[in-house]
Amino acid sequence: MELLAPAGNLEKLKYAYLYGADAAYIGISSFSLRSRAENFSGDQWREIARIKGRKKLYGAINIFFHNDDLRQLEENREYLSLYPLDAIIVSDLGAYTLLRRLFPEQRFHLSTQANCINREAARLYYDLGFSRVILGRETSLSEIREIKDTVPELELEAFVHGAMCLAYSGRCFLSSYMAGRSANQGDCTHSCRWNYRVLEEKQRPGEYYPVLENPEEGYTTILSSKDLCMFDHIEELRRAGLDSVKIEGRMKSLYYTAVVTRSYRKALDTLGERDNADGAELDAYRQELYKVSRREFSTGFYFGLRDADQTTSLSYHRRYQFLGTLGPMLANGRYQLDVKNQIRSGQEIEYIGPDILFRKDRHFKLYDEEGRAVEKADHGRSYSIETSVPVEEGYILRQKTERSTEPA
């Protein structure tokens, strides 16, 4: 199966591929359902082509289009053609019709927003010219198998990790209603993650529903779904007929992209070899999924509704803080350092890499851009780091925090 990772900007795209993705998906500015992600615009297509190499790249043009959006899409034909896309992800059939006319040789993937969850819909989309369907998140394993048996020529893709949505396949109006920002136009405020104190129905004023899950603090997160994690069930997904497993999170950090992609790479690489695989090593990569900012994990709708219907009463967990990344080697043992959060000499940090789980280091040295030793490095300035353990360009720095907090 293909491992498909999110990329919200150029740096995340680079790390998605570096840490094991076969393919990545990006948003095209103004036409993506994650408009708050950085997405891609300007002449970034040149750098995208360089980073991509022979890997696969899919572009999301998956908002729900109004007439003016269609006109804008047609006006941007030449610009869109510059992107080295192997497929376009689209949900709106009007936009799909226009895009097929503009790009007749292009492959198209049906977005999960189109709510395809049954065999007849899948057959129809295949007959319309889609080469792949990204299934609605409400699809069970048994339904996936039936869809694949019905339309074996159609590629099937599904999410295996990341945030879930309260609304049906993400088609939600809560954000638009509460904050004037439409989720279906790519501007979701994630209102379902907010904390609520009371729930009152308009026709029954003064009658409050008992929604308090945390009576000590007096609020509920009854609308907030658990996160999806199918790390332990990759074999079941393969047997069901999936061609591509997808990680959610274009708006999440480079650290999230790298760690989650790397863990699922390990899970995929040991498929069919579980009896001979190093169980301790596989478990270590499973534990890495708990070292990124996350909510409680679930298996979503794959095994029925019971797990999917459970909301989480907890906020984000974050046991590790993302500190930065290593750039090119400047001298023997010294590397350029891109600082994301403050680093202090003497603290214990960890380096993670595409092929190493982690290495600890307490005896590193920090230098400013003039080459002078410093006690701390802050985001926004140039630094280098001299390590006491073997590292390589592209490694990521983190520090254990054991805190539970909202994500940065």
Image (cartoon, rainbow, N blue to C red):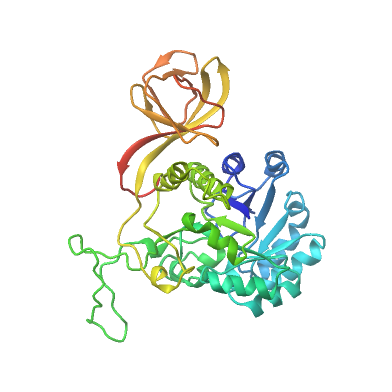
Which residue is farthest left? 216
**Residue 175 point in image, percent of width and height:** 44, 66
In the depicted structure, whether residue 248 falls above or below residue 49: below
**Residue 201 point in image, percent of width and height:** 31, 81
Which residue is farthest front? 275
Q: Quadrant of the C terminus?
A: top left
**Residue 183 point in image, percent of width and height:** 51, 65
**Is residue 393 left or right of 79 when viewed as pictured?**
left
Which residue is farthest bottom? 203
**Residue 182 point in image, percent of width and height:** 51, 66
The answer to whether residue 379 of the structure is visible from this angle is no
Q: Quadrant of the N terminus?
A: bottom right
In the depicted structure, whether residue 207 falls above or below residue 256: below
The answer to whether residue 407 of the structure is visible from this angle is yes
User: Residue 179 versus residue 99: which sits nearer the camera?
Assistant: 99
Residue at 23% x, 82% y is: 207
Q: Exactly how many numbered labels are in the figure?
A: 0
**Is residue 169 left or right of 177 when viewed as pictured?**
right
User: Residue 53 versus residue 167: which sits nearer the camera?
Assistant: 53
Residue at 76% x, 49% y is: 82
In the depicted structure, whether residue 367 falls above or below residue 404: above
**Is residue 17 left or right of 308 when viewed as pictured?**
right
